Amino acid sequence: MAGPPFSARNRGTHRQVDNAFPERARNGLTHLLIDLVEKEYVANWIVVARELQRIGRLHPTEYDKTKCASLRQAREDAEKAIESLRWDKIYDFCERLHNHLASATGYFWNDEFHEKEPKSEVQSFIAEELQRLFEEESLAFEFSQGLVRRRGRKHTVDVTTRAQVVLGDPRLVSARKHYDKAMGFFRNPSKPDFENAVKEAVCAVEAAGKALFPEAKAATLGDLAKWFSSNKDALIPKALVQTISGIYAYRSGGDGVGHGGSVGGIATAEVAEYVLAVCASQVIYLVDVSNAQENEVPF
């Protein structure tokens, strides 16, 4: 898949569009639907209109696919629905478009269907076009694996992906569960929970540290940080230990994050994304420190 279009690359650093599906994006989605119908990647405008009506809980309309007037009416109804649907319902439609409306192309010959383009290829095309649309309009979400997910910056995506690979270590089952929960809370398109994303991300670091360094006998991440600071072997530089202490302090004192904290600051989308990236880096680093410790040859 190609990278972001020029308009998105040239825009530079910007705030992503959240809690909305702007008019420009809705127009872009309509253009994509026209293309899909013309390519026969979806059956016709009737299936599009009916799906939009179902998602929006609009009154269903009876159509006749053998009549051109009915097909034109379905297209008009679909375009009106795209204009009026609530923003999160539009994202629901994008998922349904990819997962359920996409269809293989081909033709019938001697009562047999001869496939030209399989459904998987059609879905790949739809996924790429939806992702391009999301990037062009600076939407705060991405389209991947058939789902709309909160995007995050490229650095966050890179480091969280690496962390999830590292968390495949059998010792880190508990940590992985916490981090997966954190990503789920962060990525939810309609009801993101940034407070719980922060809490679970820090819990992942805590669980990883306790599993990797059982000799610390730490009950909390704060205990683990103290153990690192007092450890005679200086496994981690004290300045870096402070980053672990800092992230634990925010988890304990952040507004609505943990322990009834209300003076540590609100967990916004930007804060949650920062914590996710920092915690991912910390997990990776703790695994590296643990592996280096195990690989030391005693004399």
Image: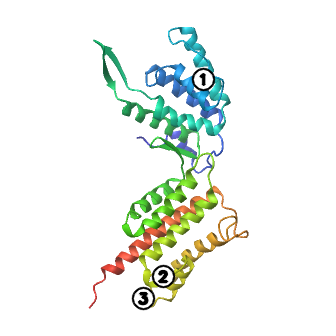
Label annotation for residue 143: none
Residue at left 55%, top 77%? 220
Q: To which residue does mark 2 refer?
A: 237
Q: To which residue does mark 1 refer?
A: 78
Category of crowding for the residue at label 3, using alpha-carbon neighbours closer than 10 angstroms: few (below 14), some (14–19), many (at least 20): few
Between circles 1 and 3, the one closer to the viewer is 1
What amino acid does circle 2 point to? Pro
What amino acid does circle 1 point to? Ala
Place of residue 51 in the rendered image (x, y in percent of width and height, measured from the top left): 56, 27
> Could you tell me if residue 271 is visible in this image?
no
Place of residue 280 in the rendered image (x, y in percent of width and height, measured from the top left): 48, 64
Q: CA distance from mark 3 to mark 2?
A: 10 Å
Label annotation for residue 233: 3
* Element at label 1: helix
Q: Is residue 123 above or below residue 76?
A: below
* Element at label 2: loop
Of residue 16 and residue 296, the one placed in the foreground of this image is 296
